[in-house]
Amino acid sequence: LVEAGARVVSEFWDEFGLAGMGWDTHWNHYPRMKVELCPGLDHGWQGLITDLDQRGLLDDTLVVCTSEHGRTPQLNSAAGAGRDHWSQVYSTVIAGGGTARGRVVGKSDRHAAEVAALPLRPKDLLATMYHLLGIDPHMRIHDPTGRPQPLVDGRVITEALA
């Protein structure tokens, strides 16, 4: 799709219908991450990034891997122990498309419970993605009643840019 000129490609990856309930690891967290979830994500991400890089497409292709929330820093009491939804801290991985290689932006405390440095919001990620696509994230668009609204109320994460 990228080679054919698509500007945006979205891939939703989950394992609904398989052993567990995809990334919703409310039980058996560690075995599911080790055996069921992380190997596929690791191989898929590495393969995609390597392929794009080797073919000279990575610099012009922004790849984003994110979720809608993080996981509790403490295990719950479910069978095999699990981790529940946690909106305070979560990770996003980005590559290519004008981002710096090998850079870590932001930091959590040692338990991944609270943000320790450079708090960022999903709106900031979205503003950064628009910026990298060449779209001004601060432009105003008009809502159905004609009122001007910002495209996104976030800041470009300049710390992540090349």
Image (cartoon, rainbow, N blue to C red):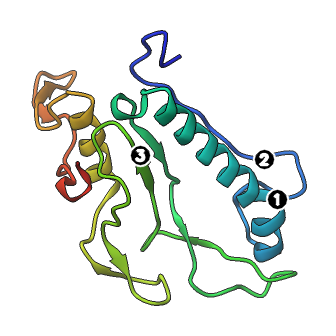
Q: Amino acid at mark 1?
A: Glu
> Is residue 35 visible from the viewing direction of this image?
yes
Residue 134 screen position, x and y as percent = 20, 27
Residue 109 screen position, x and y as percent = 40, 87
Label at residue 15: 2
- Relative depth, front residue between 69 and 2: 2
| SS at mark 3 in the image | strand
Residue 73 screen position, x and y as percent = 56, 84
Distance (Cα) linking label 1 and label 2: 9 Å
Q: Amino acid at mark 3?
A: Ala
Q: Amino acid at mark 2?
A: Glu
Distance (Cα) linking label 2 and label 3: 24 Å
User: Where 108 sits versus 69, above or below?
Assistant: below
The residue lying at 62 percent from left, 37 percent from top is 12
Q: Are marks 1 and 2 in contact (CB under 8 Å)?
A: yes
- Of the two numbered discs 1 and 3 on the same chain, state the one appearing first in sequence: 1
Quarter assignment of residue 143: top left
The residue lying at 76 percent from left, 74 percent from top is 29
Quarter assignment of residue 157: bottom left
The residue lying at 10 percent from left, 31 percent from top is 139
> Is residue 27 visible from the viewing direction of this image?
no
Q: Residues within 10 Å of mark 2 (few under 14, many from 20)?
A: few
| SS at mark 1 in the image | helix
User: Where 62 sits versus 111, above or below?
Assistant: above
Q: Which residue is mark 3?
A: 95
- Relative depth, front residue between 86 and 33: 33
The residue lying at 66 percent from left, 44 percent from top is 44
Q: Which residue is mark 1?
A: 36
